[in-house]
């Protein structure tokens, strides 16, 4: 089983840009980058607070796996004095597109993270990806025991999330400090 994490925050400093490049080389979380200050606004959608049985019928619905994983992350955040992450159908759609892309290429990656971040509608975004986990608890445990993944789940700046599983690939994509 493999997992990977990523974190991105908007800032307008050269130091931050250099830091993110070094961070990417190490495949860990952290950093700032000079990115478009006006990302696309998220698509309006309804919040889904309960799991959907089986495969989702639309990209804005959580599967049971996705709901349970978000519930585990939210319990963990509450245990650490942090607010729970609200479901964001737009982040979920971006996460689903990425998980499907990883499934088509049979490759665990953060390829296209900058584009997802710019489309997210948030000034801060973090991402964890994983492969070959069949149970939400096992995946959560793996991320919890990895410093970078754990930091992303407990990032105090995130407020909304989308989690998507496609084939054996999972993407956790979360954002904070929404743009207007």
Image: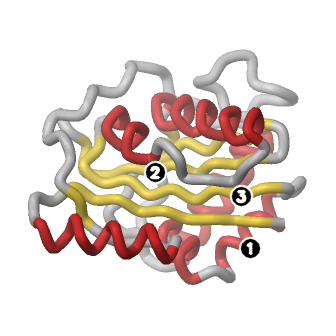
Looking at the image, is mark 1 or mark 2 earlier in the sequence? 1
Q: Which residue is mark 1?
A: 142
Mark 1 to mark 3: distance in Å? 9 Å
Mark 3 to mark 2: distance in Å? 15 Å
Looking at the image, is mark 1 or mark 3 earlier in the sequence? 3
Q: Residues within 10 Å of mark 2 (few under 14, many from 20)?
A: many
Position of residue 85 measured from the top left corner of the image (x, y, whole percent): 48, 53
For residue 16, what is the image quadrant? bottom left
For residue 29, what is the image quadrant? bottom left
Q: Residues within 10 Å of mark 3 (few under 14, many from 20)?
A: many
Position of residue 80 measured from the top left corner of the image (x, y, whole percent): 49, 79
Do labels 3 and 2 touch, CB within 8 Å? no
For residue 22, what is the image quadrant? bottom left
Vertical order, 12 against 120 (above or below)? below
Q: Which residue is mark 3?
A: 130
Q: Which residue is mark 2?
A: 174
Position of residue 1 measured from the top left corner of the image (x, y, whole percent): 84, 66
Vertical order, 107 against 96 (above or below)? below
């Amino acid at each position: 089983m493999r997992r990977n994490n990523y974190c991105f925050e908007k800032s307008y400093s050269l130091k931050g840009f250099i830091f993110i490049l070094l961070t990417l080389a190490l495949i860990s979380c952290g950093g700032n980058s000079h990115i478009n200050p006006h990302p696309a606004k998220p698509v309006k959608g309804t919040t889904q607070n309960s799991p959907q049985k089986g495969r989702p019928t639309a990209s804005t619905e959580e599967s049971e796996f996705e709901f349970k994983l978000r519930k585990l992350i939210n319990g963990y955040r509450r245990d650490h004095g942090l607010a729970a992450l609200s479901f964001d159908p737009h982040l979920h759609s971006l996460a689903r597109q990425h998980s499907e892309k990883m499934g088509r290429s049979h490759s665990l990656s953060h390829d296209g993270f900058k584009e997802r971040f710019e489309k997210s509608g948030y000034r801060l975004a973090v991402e964890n990806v994983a492969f070959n986990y069949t149970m939400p608890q096992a995946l959560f445990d793996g991320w919890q025991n990895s410093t970078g993944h754990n930091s992303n789940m407990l990032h105090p700046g995130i407020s909304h999330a989308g989690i998507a599983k496609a084939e054996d690939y999972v993407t956790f994509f979360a954002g904070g400090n929404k743009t207007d």
